[in-house]
Image (cartoon, helix red, strand yellow):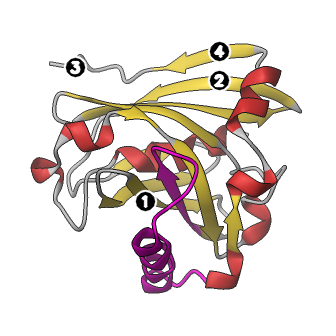
Amino acid sequence: MKVVFLTLLLGLVCGAPETATEIDPSKVTGEWHTIYAAADNKEKIVKGGLLRCYYHQIECINDCKYPSLTFYAKDDGRCQLFTEVRKRQEGDVYVIEFMGTNVLQLIYVSDNMVVTYFENDDGEKITKITEGVGRGDSFTQEELQKYPELNSKRGIPNENIENVIKTGSKKKMKGEHEQHRSRNVSQSYV
């Protein structure tokens, strides 16, 4: 379950097409909704999968050096609200040791869409995952074309795209919410 939060943390890394130092925090900070998810190991992101999550909010702290993600995910069958704050590492990635090693990266940012990418190495297999999140509950035609392109570039089959909005909803998860947990980096934000 804890691997689920890693998916969300992807949305925080500042990478291509803009570098972390070029990202406008106003494009990232705000309320977000998971619209699509894709993985080369699809069972990890389908409804009930270990890496299935629902974005709620992203905040860029100190120009996204310390992004904060708030999201809903199920842990032991219960919906929980998580807030994660992580420090950006060299190479504009976030590395998290959780159920293996996870390397996270933000691969696309626009005013209404963020696409995150991460690789989870659970010791047996490396799973590649993208999540497309939006400010609303759908993408524009241009965004609908961009998301599969980003998957293809990372070796994720487009037939493994899961429409999260159609198969689950953040509102439903929020309604089932039982507990809020926070994890923070040990370094100060300054």
Which amino acid lies under the numbered mark 1 shown in the image of this protein?
A: Val
Look at 62% across and 62% down and name the residue there.
37
Numbered mark located on residue 34 in the image:
none
Local secondary structure at mark 4:
strand
CA distance separating discs 1 and 3? 25 Å
Q: Which residues are magenta?
A: 128-157
Look at 10% across and 49% down and name the residue there.
21
Specify the quadrant of the image occupied by residue 59: top left
* 131 up-or-down from 57: above or below: below
Could you tell which of marks 4 and 1 lies nearer the N-terminus? 1
- The N terminus, quarter of image: top right
Numbered mark located on residue 81 in the image:
2
- The C terminus, quarter of image: top left
Numbered mark located on residue 115 in the image:
1
CA distance separating discs 3 and 4? 22 Å
Please tell me which residue lies in front, 163 or 66: 163
Numbered mark located on residue 189 in the image:
3
Specify the quadrant of the image occupied by residue 28: top left
- Residue 61 on image: x %, y %: 24, 26
